[in-house]
Image (cartoon, rainbow, N blue to C red):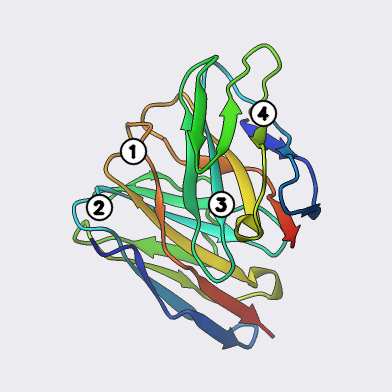
Amino acid sequence: EAGVAQSPRYKIIEKRQSVAFWCNPISGHATLYWYQQILGQGPKLLIQFQNNGVVDDSQLPKDRFSAERLKGVDSTLKIQPAKLEDSAVYLCASSLSGRSTGELFFGEGSRLTVL
Amino acid sequence: GDSVTQMEGPVTLSEEAFLTINCTYTATGYPSLFWYVQYPGEGLQLLLKATKADDKGSNKGFEATYRKETTSFHLEKGSVQVSDSAVYFCALSGMDTGRRALTFGSGTRLQVQP
């Protein structure tokens, strides 16, 4: 079974530029999550999708971050314009259902460096 | 809101030593509790979980018991190996059935020396 796929693995941009990250969850997983992991900290939830609807985006900085999951499968996370403090690893995870205590499966992450 | 507090690392042990990584949580009701592990160069993966008070999760020689009275979920292993070197994250999943996203602690790096 293929795992959660993310791209790109690494990205370096200047501040005020834009960047987009892509995630393909495990086939059949209805719930998709984006987390931000700053160096030395635990992952912090940015947004949770159930199919193509948003369940929780309370911690997403909506003035610069946006995310979509148009067909209920792949998802894209965009940052525009980027700030220095956005340097982090962006993790995508999926699960069968957001209403169970089942396991979250994580991708390897996309590491963003903002100069 | 929900939160998880873990002991800070790095924790450095010799092979075959006993491991404890402390984890306490703050949450309403009865959350589910998890330990995730991140090996070098790999993504986060579930190590073990417990979904109700007094449950013991176990996997690969690691154990953790859900203690409601002390709001704790400490990770233990009787004899660590070099291959256990990784970052360990304690996490909880809240009671809101519509929002099962995990809240993570800050992680504890374990280094096991031969």
Q: Give the label, 4 or 3, closer to the camera.
A: 3
Q: Give yes or no for contact between labels 2 and 1 (Cβ–Cβ under 8 Å).
A: no
Give the number of the mark in front: 2 or 4.
Answer: 4
Residue type pointed to by label 3: Val
| C-alpha gap between disc 3 and disc 1 | 21 Å
Q: Are marks 3 and 1 in contact (CB under 8 Å)?
A: no
Q: Nearer the viewer, mark 1 or mark 4?
A: 4
Q: Position of residue B112 (x, y in %)?
A: 73, 58
- What is the CA distance from the residue labelled 2 to the residue labelled 3? 29 Å
Do discs 3 and 1 share a chain?
A: no
Chain of the residue that carries numbered disc 3 in the rendered image: B
Q: Which residue is mark 1?
A: A98
Kind of residue at badge 1: Gly
Residue type highlighted by circle 4 = Tyr
Kindly identify the residue that appears in the image at 59 percent across and 87 percent down.
A13
In the structure shown, which secondary structural element does the residue marked by tag 2 occupy? loop
Same-subunit check for callouts 2 and 4: no
Q: Nearer the viewer, mark 3 or mark 1?
A: 3
**Amino acid on which the number 2 mark rests in the picture:** Asn
Q: CA separation, marks 2 and 1?
A: 13 Å
Q: Is residue B26 left or right of residue A63?
A: right
